[in-house]
Image: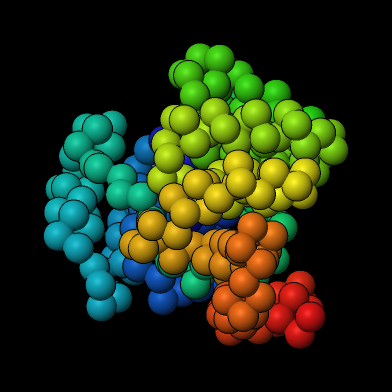
Amino acid sequence: LDLAWIQIHRGLSALALPYLEKLTTDVTTSRDAWSLRGHCHVKLGQREKAIDSYKQALALPNWTSSDKNTLKDLEAGEDCSVIASNLILLKIHPDDIREIYGAHFSDIEIKKAIRFFLKMCIQLDQEDMVTTRNLGIIQYLLNEYVEAERYLKLWVDKNGDDAEILTHLALIQQKHHKDEDAAIELYSRAIAADDTFKLALVNCASLLQQQNQFHEARPLLERALSLTDDPTHQAILLDTFANNIAAIEEDFEKEALLHREAFSLEPKNYMFAGNYIV
């Protein structure tokens, strides 16, 4: 649904329609899918098909007043272009995407589909920085590091330092270029841009400790530990902090407690299990 929304928003309704037709065939009980298909038909000037789609949406429990009013306008003979201009497309919640797509496509297929549509969007407007950012991130998630780096660097050049984007660029330095020093530099820029971005704090500290710079890593770990409202990356944070405690204070009892806590958060992670046992 999110992909179809992007296409329709970019004026590519004809390309979105086949996917919506398949989706409403596979998942007949999705009001969101039927409503978006109806909107797609409206954008294409297909009045009767739009009417049929909105009727399907209204037959489902979570129909909206927008569905009802749009159907009323269609049946009254209102011009499709006027109806389309008055409609507000609501972005579908990610949970709905997972619920609908999950049974049909693997995660990697969904990511590849998103990449395909974003590349189509960027061809229409190469100055669209929202699409540039999202394309860089999705290509990173697909391990397409060269292309991801190009788009992410372009975004930073146009918009300035951003913690999330700089962290992705740092990860590319680690995974693709194998350049720890360059990664540390990018993580440091990310932290300077936003010192609450936990992944940058933890990853930078971890790399510093790999270079035996435990004292330099300590303030980063303490800052990450202070972010009590953010539960993400907590296991790796505790595991890294345990190593820091052992190296600086040589408090091996506290180290063991921290490793155990990390292991309890992610018991299937063999690294945490190994560190706790050791």
Judging depth in this view, the residue of 266 and 242 nearest the camera is: 242
Q: Would you say 71 lies left or right of 190 here? A: left
The image shows residue 233 at horizontal and vertical percentages of: 55, 62
Judging depth in this view, the residue of 117 and 28 nearest the camera is: 117
Colouring method of the image = rainbow
Q: Would you say 250 lies left or right of 83 here? A: right
Name above or below for residue 206 compared with residue 122: below
Residue at position x 38%, y 57% in the image: 227
Residue at position x 62%, y 71% in the image: 251
Q: Would you say 180 lies left or right of 263 here? A: right
Indicate the quadrant containing the C terminus: top left, top right, bottom left or bottom right. bottom right
Judging depth in this view, the residue of 214 and 236 nearest the camera is: 214
Could one spot residue 261 in this view of the protein?
Answer: yes
* Quarter location, residue 254: bottom right
The image shows residue 151 at horizontal and vertical percentages of: 64, 26
The image shows residue 145 at horizontal and vertical percentages of: 77, 36
How many labels sit on residues? 0
Q: Would you say 241 lies left or right of 177 here? A: left
The image shows residue 201 at horizontal and vertical percentages of: 54, 46
Could one spot residue 199 in this view of the protein?
Answer: no
Residue at position x 64%, y 57% in the image: 248
Name above or below for residue 41 compared with residue 187: below
Residue at position x 36%, y 63% in the image: 228
* Quarter location, residue 105: bottom right
